[in-house]
Amino acid sequence: MGGPRMVTVSRSGGGGGVECCCCRCCTCLHLQFLKTTPGALKIAEVVAGALCQSLLINFGLIDSGRLGASFVSFLTTVSSCLMTTSLLLACYVLSENSFRLIRSSLFETLFNAVASFLFLSASSYLAFSVIEYLLPVYKITPFYQAYPAMTSAYMFGLVLGVLHGIDAYLAYRHFRGVC
């Protein structure tokens, strides 16, 4: 049985933080994550999701009655996926250990696969409703802003579906230890 053993744990995260003039500050931050492919994907997902949600709230609420369930399903998809992706991004930037643990679990793969499916299906449904119900109004009403805004929203939704699909594939490869 020997005495107690000393274990050294590095909390710097391999040089994390912000480089100042003569030292390194805020070593709790894992900013190197933002330079990786998963980091760039998370930033793109958050920005595109925020744009989608902004378009929906600022231009779509007025015509949500015309769009019906397609508007509600798309807004629900955007809101839930944006919140989850933002939380993951915050965890990954604040802790390198979180990135290693969460990314290597099945959660990241399943979340991105489900998000991809939801975005692709909700965007398709919204596209149908926009073309069916808002396009005729756009053709006869001057300065009608809902149609171009909702068209942009479902296009961003399709892009988000592809981004989450790529992220799901990369997360699956990381989960399997391929990369």
Image (cartoon, rainbow, N blue to C red):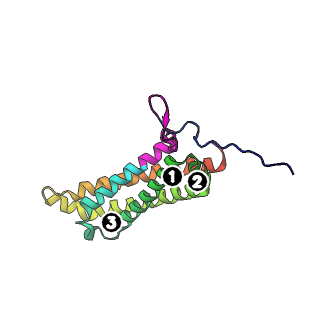
- Among all residues in the image, which is located at the extreme front? 3
Type of residue at label 1? Cys
* 20 lies above or below 88: above
Residue 80 visible from this viewpoint? yes
Between 145 and 38, the one lying in front of the other is: 38
Which residue is label 1 attached to? 91
Image location (x, y in percent) of residue 109: 57, 55
Between discs 1 and 3, the one toward the N terminus: 3
| Label 3: few (<14), some (14–19) or many (≥20) C-alpha neighbours in 10 Å | many
Type of residue at label 2? Ile
* 15 lies above or below 69: above
Q: Kindly identify the residue that appears in the image at 58 percent across and 41 percent down.
A: 13
Between discs 3 and 2, the one toward the N terminus: 3
Q: Is residue 23 magenta?
A: yes
Name the mark on residue 102. 2
Measure the alpha-carbon separation of dots 3 and 2.
32 Å
Image location (x, y in percent) of residue 25: 48, 38
Between discs 1 and 2, the one toward the N terminus: 1
Image location (x, y in percent) of residue 42: 46, 48
Disc 3 secondary structure class:
helix
Type of residue at label 3? Phe
The magenta stretch is: 19-44
Labels 3 and 2 touching (C-beta < 8 A)? no
Disc 2 secondary structure class:
helix
Q: Is residue 82 magenta?
A: no
Q: Quadrant of the C terminus?
A: top right
Name the mark on residue 71. 3
Q: Kindly identify the residue that appears in the image at 85 percent across and 48 percent down.
A: 2
